[in-house]
Amino acid sequence: MKSKFRISLTSPIIFLLVKTTFISQGTTFLSNLDTPTIGNLPVASDTWVSTWFQTGPSPAGYTLNSIQLSFGNDTGNPSGISVMIWDFRNRQSLANLSGSDPFSFGVYTYTASDFNLLPSTVYWFAVKSSTTAEIGSFQWNYSAPGGFIPGLDLWSGGSYPTSSDGVVWDRGNSVGKLQFAVNATAIPEPSSLVLLGLGGSFLFTRLARKSRSKALTQQ
């Protein structure tokens, strides 16, 4: 009877773990990856490219899970791509995302680690590499220009600037909309977490009482 009792108690815990793993993958709140590619921009250590997105109004904000970028075939021998959430005011990275160099045409995923996004706030992310354009460059794809990129829950995105050093940025480029997607998880409000905890405690207590009653009747 002890083994059955243990399985009964761990079942809801396993369910919550599976659910948490699923949620951690995030929701695609913003994407234009499904639009036709009409060209690409070179990315190198002396050719930074950036674009922006605005989060939705979820009161507690969001956890950034990943950013996906569409690239074409690289030119030359580039290496060491860097994808960063960028602070234009202080000219520094707020978060560095992890992922692989985009040598061939496709969509590449760059994951974040414990970086939270405020609600209804504009963020920029910048992309560069560790090699100069003379050696080679990665090619970030873009689609047709015009208007903002609409997303879920009032998220949006738009135009982009370029830079040679990450300090001085040229905001006048408008050849198209860089192709990207943002995946995030809405952070539950504190009241929701309290209710979830109370619900889990109630379920655990009920299962424990039921198992003890069953054990007593079988003695």
Image: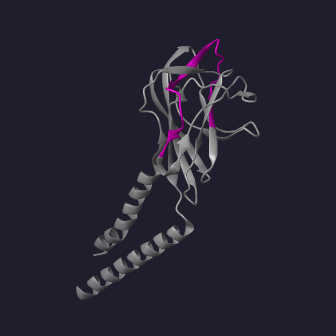
Q: Is residue 219 visible?
A: no
Of residues 182 and 9, the one drawn nearer to the viewer in this rendering: 182
Residue span colored magenta: 125-151
In this image, 80 relative to 69: left or right?
A: right
In this image, 106 relative to 53: left or right?
A: left
**Which color mode does the image show?**
one colour
- State whether residue 211 is above or below residue 177: below
Q: Residue at x 66, y 21 (%)?
A: 47
Q: Residue at x 75, y 36 (%)?
A: 91
Of residues 126 and 113, the one drawn nearer to the viewer in this rendering: 126
- State whether residue 185 is above or below residue 10: above
Tell me if residue 127 is in the magenta stretch.
yes
- Residue 81 falls in image quadrant: top right
Quadrant in which the C terminus is drawn = bottom left
| The residue positioned farthest toward the front in the image shown | 146
In this image, 167 relative to 97: left or right?
A: right
Of residues 4 and 121, the one drawn nearer to the viewer in this rendering: 121
In this image, 91 relative to 69: left or right?
A: right
Q: Residue at x 40, y 57 (%)?
A: 19
Q: Position of residue 82 (x, y in %)?
A: 61, 31
Q: Position of residue 46 (x, y in %)?
A: 69, 20
